[in-house]
Image (cartoon, rainbow, N blue to C red):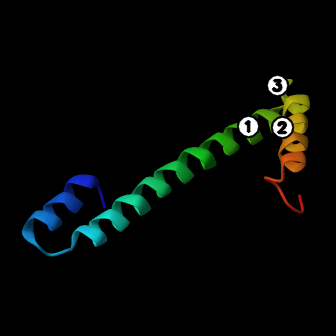
Amino acid sequence: MNRRRVFKLLAMGRITAAEAERLMAAWQASRENGWILLGCAGVAVMAFVNTGAAPMVQHLVHALRVTGWMHGV
């Protein structure tokens, strides 16, 4: 669902303002997750092809473990 459709449903009275807010928050979260997934896939491909990114990926994984972002990896 895109923003215009949510606004249209709100204007027609088919959803409440609270429902519109929840839909917008969910839509934004899904977009952010998509960019994160795309970035991770790009790093994985670079590491797989061995473009010299392997040490950088290892450092990134270590930093994420230390800060608590990755658990059990």
Residue 29, image x and y in percent?
49, 56
Q: Quadrant of the C terminus?
A: bottom right
Give neighbour class at mark 3: few <14, some 14-19, many 20+ (Cα, 10 Å).
few
Residue 20, image x and y in percent?
27, 66
> Does residue 42 appear to the left or right of 15 in the view shown?
right
Amino acid at circle 3: Thr
Say whether marks 2 and 1 touch (CB < 8 Å). Answer: yes
Q: Residue at x 43, y 53 (%)?
A: 28
Q: Which residue is mark 3?
A: 51
Judged by depth in the image, the label closer to the viewer, 3 or 1, is 1
Q: Which residue is mark 1?
A: 43
Residue 8, image x and y in percent?
14, 61
Q: At numbered mark 3, what does the secondary structure look like: helix, strand or loop? A: loop
Judged by depth in the image, the label closer to the viewer, 2 or 3, is 2
Please identify the residue farthest to the front as the structure is shown.
18
Residue 7, by quadrant, is bottom left
Label annotation for residue 60? 2
Q: CA distance from mark 3 to mark 1?
A: 10 Å
* Mark 3 or mark 1: whose residue is earlier in sequence: 1
Q: Residue at x 76, y 42 (%)?
A: 44
Q: CA distance from mark 2 to mark 3?
A: 16 Å
